[in-house]
Image (cartoon, helix red, strand yellow):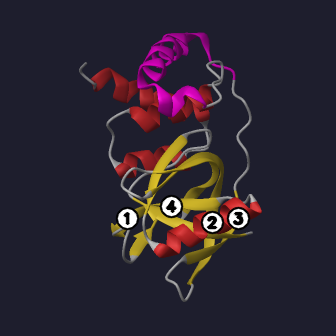
Amino acid sequence: MEVSLFPLHTVLYPGGPLPLRIFEKRYLDMISRCMKSDSPFGVLLIKEGSETGTAETCDVGTLAKITDWYQGSDGLLGVTAVGQQRFRVRSVRREDDGLFVGEVDLLPVESVCPLPEKYQPLADILSGVLDDLGRLYEDVDKNYGDAGWISYRYAEILPITPPQKQSCLETDDPIERLESMRAVLETVRF
């Protein structure tokens, strides 16, 4: 599969929201093409470099589907996307306009993993937190009975480093990912 790539200093997870403010021509054009063709773009974490220049990225990312857009009061395009399926980059080329396009392999879609009873308190806490976060999560499909879904939401909102967030994206076992998020949650002071 070939997909336009959007290197960012953030990690997008399947099922998670991604608010963006678009101002570079290459990304405005990319968003326009994606909206016209109803196709996703790929989000990759930047390891080195910048969002507006050249960047070295991780090899595993997430497809993003645009769900909403608006014109900001400052004239910038605002976009909300939702993470879909994870992918691994096989090769990348740079277009004349500076946009990166990747040949990617889609990674298997994670099956729903029933939440073990011992993790139920994490689901309860998350429910309250997402309600408090308001608009960003109000249109996100919620599945508090799925260990994978819960672990991805914690990885989004907990104050962990970008490499830790990337590690969560690359972890295939939802219980392992949830356990690592539980360990982080125990160190966070509210």
Residue contact between numbered discs 4 and 3, judged by CB atoms under 8 Å? no
Inspect the image, locate mark 1, and give the three-letter code of the amino acid beneath it.
Answer: Lys
Residue range (magenta): 114-139
Element marked by disc 4? strand
For the residues carrying marks 2 and 1, which lies nearer the camera in this image?
2
User: Could you tell me how far apart the alpha carbons at marks 2 and 4 are, in whole angstroms?
Assistant: 19 Å
Label 2 vs 3, first from the N-terminus: 2
User: Could you tell me how far apart the alpha carbons at marks 2 and 1 are, in whole angstroms?
Assistant: 27 Å
Q: Which residue is mark 1?
A: 47
| Residue positioned 50% across, 61% down in the render | 44
Is residue 110 shown above or below 184?
below
Q: Which residue is mark 2?
A: 32
**Disc 2: CA contacts within 10 A as few (<14), some (14-19) or many (>=20):** few
Q: Percent position (x, y) of residue 134?
A: 46, 25
| Residue positioned 54% across, 59% down in the render | 43
Q: Which residue is mark 3?
A: 105
Q: Which residue is mark 4?
A: 44
Q: Quadrant of residue 183?
A: top left
User: Could you tell me how far apart the alpha carbons at marks 2 and 3 are, in whole angstroms?
Assistant: 24 Å
Inspect the image, locate mark 2, and give the three-letter code of the amino acid beneath it.
Answer: Ser
